[in-house]
Amino acid sequence: MALGKFLGLFLIHIALLLGLCFAGDPFVFYDFEVSYFTASPLGVPQQVIAINNKFPGPTLNATTNNNVVVNVRNKLDESLLIHWSGIQQRRSSWQDGLPGTNCPIPPKWNWTYQFQVKDQIGSFFYFPSLHFQRAAGGFGGFIINNRDIIPIPFDTPEGDITIMIGDWYTRNHTALRKVLDAGKDLGMPDGVLINGKGPYRYNDTLVPDGIDYETINVHPGRTYRLRVHNVGISTSLNFRIQSHNLLLAETEGSYTVQQNYTSLDIHVGQSYSFLLTTDQNASTDYYIVASARFVNESLWKRVTGVAILRYSNSKGKAAGPLPDPPQDEYDKTFSMNQARSIRWNVSASGARPNPQGSFRYGSINVTDIYVLQNKPPVTIDGKRRTTLSGISFVNPTTPVRLADQFKVKGVYKLDFPKIPLTGSPKMETSVINGTYRGFMEVILQNNDTKVQSYHMSGYAFFVVGMDYGEWSENSRGTYNKWDGIARTTTQVYPGAWTAILISLDNVGVWNLRTENLDSWYLGQETYVRVVNPEATNKTELPMPDNALYCGALSKLQKPQDISWATSITGGRSKLFFTVLMIASALLFLSR
């Protein structure tokens, strides 16, 4: 008992000490156990990737400027990286979870991510970035809330609901990988999942019996915030709820001008927040639908996700046909015009108290221009590959950021072309040389036959224009220079271009890629290297003490489990974990 009392007082003193150590921005802690799990979302048992035995994984919840600590235990049989898609880790690409910046977490190892969600709000998600693993799961939502002193531009919703939609195959990710490695297409998906579950049986012919479906329960006369993420492989999806309007309020960290949509196209990797008002009668439940876009509807009818919206006073099950998708088979501008209608709410505050619109991006001089062109897959050195401006990216065995830190030569070339190559395509580790504090214009030219989504890590960019045809200098006359949405993932329609502007104020090595998982796997990506030339100006956080080593630096890696991150608070974080573990062990032994 005496030892127990002593330890109780000891822990109280430690808590007070830690309160002084971490008197700055608060910390939030999560534990991830990443493992295989058997599930049957489409009625066929298959191997999926679960986090803490959940598929999809848990939704992370943080507030602007929080320090987020996620301890990851890799229980897979292959290496792992978790990427925090859309989280703009200020001053540190060390925690980005991509092969160009981080060495992978070996099987059976622990590794702890620690980063700050500085000056951010909004709806994002995380996923495993290696080995085509996202096709098997491992994803989940990531919410960053406003601080209490910063108002949201709408009344506080009754509830906050995360919805993950995406195309799905009943083959596991290793089988899909082999298909791509063999030079073949994946073919039509087997279905669309909503929150990891298959479709409600709205049609006895298309949907087999016994499939578990998602039900979202609501009360009548309330307003809910729906955060919808397309975490699929390569299929653009139209999202809609029977008899209800979707009031768009936010996308990937930016509050939007609030507009009602009966449905919205959500492309791979994109996230949207809708305000849903439950203003219908409750004679029946209502369908929630995510259906494939820009495909042969007659062949793809079975590739439709269907969930149920259930009022607490509902009088019966949903029945009848699904609500219609957009009727634009012969109008290729409908979806693009819908995308153009999404505007930035320049009168709303974001993570800071000043209006977002005070950042007048339209009046900033452009310092660098890159035209990034993708084409259908090509054969390079006998392998089927995808390209960006004629280059198929090869991930180095030593990550770019680690090579810079230790001055390892020959890992990459800083020669990515500003305009597409005219000669034969090639496989290289070619990186964009970004100008620190420059303002870069990137034109994404899609010369393929399907929609591509593009994402850039570490940044939100301004989507200022899109149109069909080839981009030219004259296209700038169509740019939106006032309230183009700032986001992290944008779509580029086939035979069309999208223009984005990026303020390169975040040092690090940042991935610029297609989110279409098959195209990304085959090489359609690059990195933007942003270095502060002033050596004495501390604009980047130091390399974390728990950094993993691989490639040319493998000999530096200790052969033991590395568990604790110290990237932000250095020795204080190490002290925190060490003392906590000792105190916990002593308390256990005293029982």
Image (tube, rainbow, N blue to C red):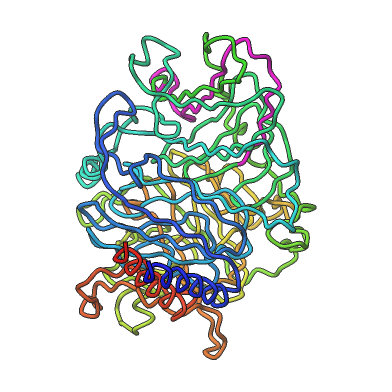
512 over 184 or under it: above or below: below
Rendered location of residue 453, percent (x, y): 49, 46
167 over 312 or under it: above or below: below
Is 210 placed left or right of 12 in the picture? left
Q: What's the residue at 39%, 26% (across, down)? A: 198
Task: Examine the image and state in which quarter residue 448 appears.
Answer: top left
* Residue lying farthest to the bottom in this orientation: 536
- Residue 201 seen in the figure: yes
Q: Nearer the viewer, residue 560 or 383?
A: 560
Is 107 placed left or right of 395 in the picture? left
* Residue lying farthest to the right in this orientation: 347
The boundaries of the magenta stretch are 273-300
- Residue 518 seen in the figure: no
306 over 586 or under it: above or below: above
Rendered location of residue 189, percent (x, y): 34, 31
Rendered-image quadrant of the N terminus: bottom left
Rendered location of residue 514, percent (x, y): 44, 51
For residue 296: magenta?
A: yes
For residue 19: magenta?
A: no
Q: Nearer the viewer, residue 17 or 481?
A: 17
Rendered location of residue 321, percent (x, y): 52, 11
Rendered-image quadrant of the C terminus: bottom left
